[in-house]
């Protein structure tokens, strides 16, 4: 007569690409039969090295992983006591799993898991709908990913929709997760306005569940967050000049990052848009260098004539080995390396503001205003902003002559202050 056994182990092959968390699996055997289940238990990259195969536990004090595994181990040991001996030894691994693993029993229809409902809503309602624009769908998907990561990190993958909505405690935990620094995930906490934008996309999905009778109330009713973003940091034209005039004899590799940052300032493109910008996106004509592309984040159109400082950078890398291979306007660089070198750039140029990829875009908008480019449709066309919710979208069309005029106005301003 065979004796049932269990074994816990971290399944490194299933480590999350985004979360970097490694799930713990349980292997249940009885004779020649076996089954494996993924547990709602995850090990961070920092703790993975403390896993001991002989004890099937982490060799650290007071951790949630060991506590959860002890609960399952206790249930397994108690199963022999509460089950008739003739039945116990005949239990299949699947039957044992149903008895000792929390959250794996079949749920009734009103006990659908939170993540299943949310993901199904996105798949069946948001994705096929023409009323949601591409950028809106991207934002919904981003919010759902944050919710999924929160549930995974806290071992709540099987949290039911009903339990999530029955009180505000899980919603409060979700809010705290979004705004907190989490070292083991290398996660930096969001600002309250950013967290509010994530929760804002989860709310209508929960409201749909309430309408369907699968939930009784919204758990976000008492969650208070600031929706107004703080003022964006922008560079002054004097600080832009210090960047432009900097030399890099001692740090030659820094020059490419400076040029990419300046190109973003002179065009208003984001980091992602600069990285993907192809030579074919810029048309050279008698009127100048005409940039015609689409924003990676929103899918909105960007159209403008490049100012002279941007053209100088374009020509500088025209025969660079990287751009010749990739056919991009500028050499591509990973975001992590970009951010590190922006910090070095700030120190070298004695700029006290924290340089980030977003600052370049915000600075462009500020400089356009300082230069006197005041036509809103023109500003939107240059920055890649949508006017679909305004009447001007229906009645205004930005022609090349307006973009040329804006280019010349911006050019004159930059020439005056950067020369």
Image (tube, rainbow, N blue to C red):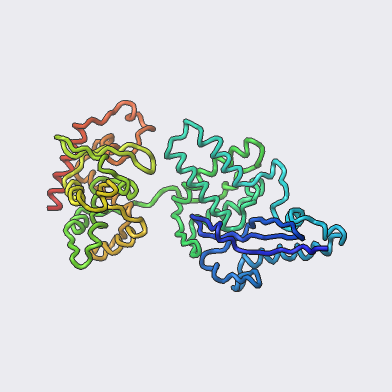
Taking depth in this image into account, of 11 and 355 the one nearest to the observer is 11
Taking depth in this image into account, of 7 and 129 the one nearest to the observer is 7
Number of numbered discs on residues: 0
Q: Residue furthest front?
A: 32
Q: Which residue occupies 20% across, 33% down? A: 402
Above or below: residue 10 compared with residue 148: below
| The quadrant where residue 350 appears | bottom left
Q: Which residue occupies 45% across, 42% down? A: 138
Q: Position of residue 60 (x, y in %)?
A: 59, 73
| The quadrant where residue 341 appears | bottom left
Residue 404 relative to residue 229: left or right: left
Look at the image and tell me in which quarter the N terminus lies: bottom right
Q: Position of residue 362 (x, y in %)?
A: 30, 49
Q: Residue furthest top?
A: 395
Q: Which residue occupies 74% across, 65% down? A: 74
Taking depth in this image into account, of 68 and 388 the one nearest to the observer is 68
Q: Position of residue 392 (x, y in %)?
A: 32, 30
Q: Position of residue 114 (x, y in %)?
A: 61, 46
Above or below: residue 291 compared with residue 391: below
Q: Which residue occupies 49% across, 51% down? A: 225
Taking depth in this image into account, of 63 and 192 the one nearest to the observer is 63
Residue 160 relative to residue 286: left or right: right
Residue 41 relative to residue 19: left or right: right
């Amino acid at each position: 007569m065979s004796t049932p056994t269990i074994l816990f182990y971290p399944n490194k092959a299933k480590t999350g690409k985004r979360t970097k968390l490694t799930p713990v699996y349980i292997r249940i055997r009885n004779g020649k039969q076996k089954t494996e289940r993924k547990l709602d238990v995850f090990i961070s990259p920092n703790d993975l090295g403390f896993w001991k195969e002989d004890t099937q536990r982490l060799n650290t004090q007071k951790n949630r992983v060991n506590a959860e595994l002890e609960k399952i181990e206790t249930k397994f040991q108690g199963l022999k006591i509460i089950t008739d001996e003739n039945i116990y030894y005949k239990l299949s691994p699947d039957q044992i799993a149903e008895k000792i693993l929390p959250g794996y029993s079949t749920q009734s229809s009103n006990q659908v898991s939170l993540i299943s409902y949310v993901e199904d809503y996105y798949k069946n309602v948001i994705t096929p709908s023409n009323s949601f624009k591409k950028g809106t769908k991207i934002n919904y998907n981003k919010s759902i990913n944050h919710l999924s990561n929160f549930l995974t990190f806290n071992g709540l993958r099987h949290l039911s929709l009903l339990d999530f909505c029955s009180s505000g405690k899980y919603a409060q935990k979700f809010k705290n997760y979004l705004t907190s620094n989490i070292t083991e995930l290398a996660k930096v906490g969001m600002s309250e306005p950013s967290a509010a934008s994530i929760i804002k996309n989860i709310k209508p999905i929960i409201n749909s569940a309430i309408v369907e009778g699968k939930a009784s109330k919204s758990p976000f009713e008492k969650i208070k967050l600031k929706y107004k973003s703080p003022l964006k940091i922008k560079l002054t034209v004097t600080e832009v000049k210090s960047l432009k005039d900097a030399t890099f004899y001692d740090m030659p590799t820094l020059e490419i990052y400076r040029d990419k940052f300046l190109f973003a300032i002179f065009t208003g493109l984001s980091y992602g848009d600069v990285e993907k910008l192809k030579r074919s996106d810029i048309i050279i004509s008698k009127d100048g260098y005409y940039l015609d592309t689409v924003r990676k984040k929103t899918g909105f159109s960007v159209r403008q004539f490049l100012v002279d400082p941007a053209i100088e950078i374009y020509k500088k890398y025209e025969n660079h080995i990287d751009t010749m291979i990739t056919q991009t306007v500028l050499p591509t660089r990973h975001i992590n390396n970009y951010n590190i070198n922006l910090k070095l750039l700030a120190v070298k140029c004695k700029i006290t503001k924290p340089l980030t990829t977003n600052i370049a875009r915000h600075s462009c908008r500020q400089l356009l205003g300082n230069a006197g480019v005041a036509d809103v449709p023109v500003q939107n066309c240059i920055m890649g902003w949508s006017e679909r919710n305004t009447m001007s979208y229906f009645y205004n069309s930005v022609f090349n002559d307006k973009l040329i005029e804006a280019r010349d106005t911006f050019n004159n301003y930059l020439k005056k202050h950067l020369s």
